[in-house]
Structures are given as structure tokens and as C-alpha cells.
Amino acid sequence: MAATSWGVLLAILLQQLAEVHTLTGHVCTEKRSRSVMIYTSASRQQYQRYSTKCGFGGWKRCTRYRPITAYYSRPVYQTQYYQTQVCCSGWKQTGTTCNTPICSRGCVQGSCTAPNVCTCTSGYSGARCDTDINECTGSHGCQHNCVNTAGSYRCTCRTGYVLYGTKNCTDINECTAGTHRCDHTCHNSIGSYYCTCRDGYRLQGSHSCLDIDECTSNNGGCSQICSNIPGSYRCSCNVGYALQADSHSCRDIDECSTGNGGCAHNCTNTVGSFFCTCRTGFVLDGNGLTCSDHDECSTSHHGCEQKCNNLHGSYYCSCNIGYILAADKKLCNDVDECSNGTHACDHNCHNTRGSYTCSCRNGYELAPDGRGCIDINECDRGTDGCGHICKNTQGSFYCTCQSGWHLGTDNKTCLGNPCVAIDTPNNGARACSGFVTNETCTFYL
């Protein structure tokens, strides 16, 4: 037990010696204390279990306990004082040296080079190196503008220039760099640029180009139609005109000189146009070019008194049967068929306007055709007036009488022939109705 305690103490002593001799630099010694655990020997009484034979003949095993003294080591803490090496105030240990200074407030933009002493990087000042130095208030060397930055500065150039190196400025050619805003043409100048526009445009503001509407001033010089186009204009002519070589004047086009203007018949040129007409007897179609036959007869303007007959491109008048066309080829004069021998009457012809009628001599009647004459059989019709017998003849008739009769002076009445006189009987009397044929006598006693 004593050997163990001395071993522990020896180890502590060797450690202290090592600590004293390992640090270098800004090293100071310091007395320190610490609790050290050592072991001491101790004993105590306790019972030990064991097994023994027991029972009849010793054939069993029994457990028994017996007192023994047990020895053991127990720890004991003791306070020990020793000298050790530490870094002096303001320094900290790095590895086995004490050469790293301590700046308690820290160095913001710099490094700690001695206890609580900061060495600032370029562009900063102050105990903690936390104050920016504004180089632009001094001789910064910038050709144009100086811009202070945290811990430094930078040079910039005015508009139209670009930094050359770190301090100088050179002109920017915005036109070749493609940074200009000109709509059309860019012209570089020292430190800037300016814009111009192509012909037919005008500059609006400094960059934009607006089309000039030339047509708003004197119609662009065009004699008829002025059409504005981007950056220019052009002249054109109304229908029926052609643009001259000066690109401004217009001359009339003679449409009739080429293909008759498309007209089927007649083409008439007018200033700026033309029109088609048709020959007599034709009318212009809706397309204004072709001609169709004019059916004069379908209108009331033909002038024919009776009949109008249409022809292709013309017409003629004619008359109804019984009329003949007058010298004016329009009016109709009556034809006297009776006098010119063109009638068809068997007997008598009677002219009427536009025709004629027929009649027959006595004893005839008009046939159904109104022209021929048919003998009238007066005998059959009972219109003869004959007393006895009627004999028809062509165009007439005559009367005859039965035997014992003779025709009277009217050639119709039959008169009885005279009878032989009948004397009065010697005895008796007689009464006679007459003494001609068919008369009677009555005798009385």
C-alpha cells in the first residue's frame, strides 16, 4: 500500500516538472493547488462461504460460513500546491509557445500584434480597426470620380467613358459597342453620342425616329393619290390614269386603244375612264361591256301599229290580215279585197276595215265558210208561196198548178180553169159555188 502512494506522488511530481519546462515565449510562473487522490491500505472482518461434507457418512455437502479479515485499498483526496508555467497577461498559449497577443476588444479590420494593440489593414483606422478611411477626401488619383468603399475606394468615369486601368478614363464608342439607343444612325462624340434619322424620318427626343408623312404637305407633290409609307411615300393614280415617268404626274389612259377597252361594240374614251355603247338594236349588259339583242317589241317604243317582230339587233313591223304596211313601215292601211280581186266571195263582196264580208244574190244563202253561195230550196223550206206545185231552180223557183188549174198573175196562185156551163135542170133547181175547177153545184127538186 505504501509503494502505491509513493508511485502516485512521483507521477504528479514528474508532470509538474514537465509543465515547468515546456512553455516558451512570454512565460510566467504561477502557484496553483489541486486535489490529488491517493490510496491507503485498510482491512475489515467479513464472512466467507464454503462447502463441506456433512450428514451420515459424509455423503452430503453443506454450506458453512467462517470469519476472515479482508484487506483492500481506498482512495483519499489531498490538497497539493505546486508551481506551473503560464502565459503572461495579454498573451495566449499556442501550442507550446506564449507568443500570441490578446486584444480583448478584438480587431475588426486588422490583426492583434501586441496585447490590446491592433494593427489595421489598409483603409481602416482606430483602436479596433473599425473606422473606414475615406480615401476620396485625399489624393486618390482618380481621373474622374472617386467612390469610397469599405476599407478602400474605387474610381469611376462619367457617362460616356469607361475605366482604363484602375484610375484613368477613356471615351466609350457607344455606336460600335451597341450600347446606344438610336433608332437609326449613331454618331460617336467625346464622352457621348448623338442620333440622326434616315431620309423620310425626323428625330423625336434624342433617340427615336418618327416617319414623316409627306402626303400632309401639298399632297407630297402627287397629282392624284399620295400614299405614305415608312420613311417615304409614293404617288399613284385613279382608275383610268397611268403614272408618268416623273412618278408624280398622271395621264389619262385611252382604254379604247387596247382591245377596244373590252367593249363588244363601241368604245368611247373619257378623261380618266371610258364607256361602252351598243349598235342600234342592242342594249348594254349589266357588266357594261357586252351587248345583247334589244327586244324592241317588249317595250312600248317600237312604234308598230299592229305587229312587232324582233330580229337580232333590229325589228320590223307587220300588219294583221286585211291590212298592208304603210310607207312609214309602222302604220297599217286597210286592204280593199273587193276592189283588188283578192276576195273569195262567190257573189257579192263588201269591204270592211281589215277584212271583207260576202253576200249572195236572191235565191242563195251564204255557205258556212262565209264566202261561197248555196242555192236556197224555197220549195223544201215552204217559203215559195206556190198554190199547188213548187219547182226549185238554181237561185230561184217557180210554181205550177195541178190539172184543171192555171197559174194566176202572181205566178204563185192557182186558179181553177172555167167549167162547161151546167144548165138549170128542167125539174128542180141548182145552187153552184162557182163555175171553175173544184167548185160544186147542188141540185134541188
Image (cartoon, rainbow, N blue to C red):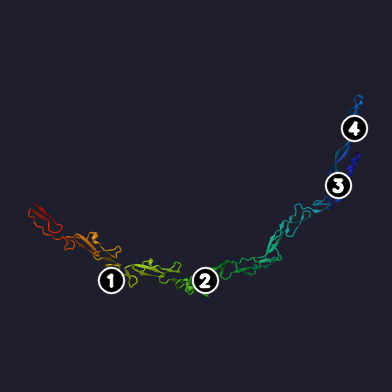
Name the residue nearer the viewer: 378 or 320: 378
CB contact under 8 Å: marks 3 and 1:
no
Which residue is denoted by mark 2 in the rendering? 235
Name the residue nearer the viewer: 342 or 81: 342
The mark found on residue 339 in the picture is 1
Q: Label 3, label 1: how many angstroms apart (C-alpha)?
A: 188 Å
Q: Label 2, label 4: how many angstroms apart (C-alpha)?
A: 138 Å
In this rendering, position of residue 107 left or right of residue 280? right
- In front of the other: label 3 or label 4? 4
Which residue is denoted by mark 4 in the rendering? 69
Residue 137 is at least partly visible in this image:
no
CB contact under 8 Å: marks 2 and 1:
no
The residue sitting at 11% across, 54% down in the picture is: 442
215 lies above or below 34 = below
Q: Earlier in the sequence, mark 3 or mark 1?
A: 3
Amino acid type, mark 4: Thr
Does dot 2 land on a helix, a strand or a loop? strand
Residue 81 at x, y = what percent?
Answer: 85, 44
Amino acid type, mark 2: Cys
Does dot 3 land on a helix, a strand or a loop? strand
Q: How dense is the environment of label 3, judged by Cα within 10 Å: few (below 14), some, or many (20 and up)?
A: some
Q: Label 3, label 4: how many angstroms apart (C-alpha)?
A: 43 Å
Q: Earlier in the sequence, mark 4 or mark 1?
A: 4
Which residue is denoted by mark 3 in the rendering? 83
Q: How dense is the environment of label 2, judged by Cα within 10 Å: few (below 14), some, or many (20 and up)?
A: many
Amino acid type, mark 1: Ser
Q: How dense is the environment of label 4, judged by Cα within 10 Å: few (below 14), some, or many (20 and up)?
A: few
Q: Label 3, label 2: how many angstroms apart (C-alpha)?
A: 115 Å
241 lies above or below 45 = below
Q: Earlier in the sequence, mark 3 or mark 2?
A: 3
Q: Earlier in the sequence, mark 2 or mark 4?
A: 4
Name the residue nearer the viewer: 93 or 126: 93
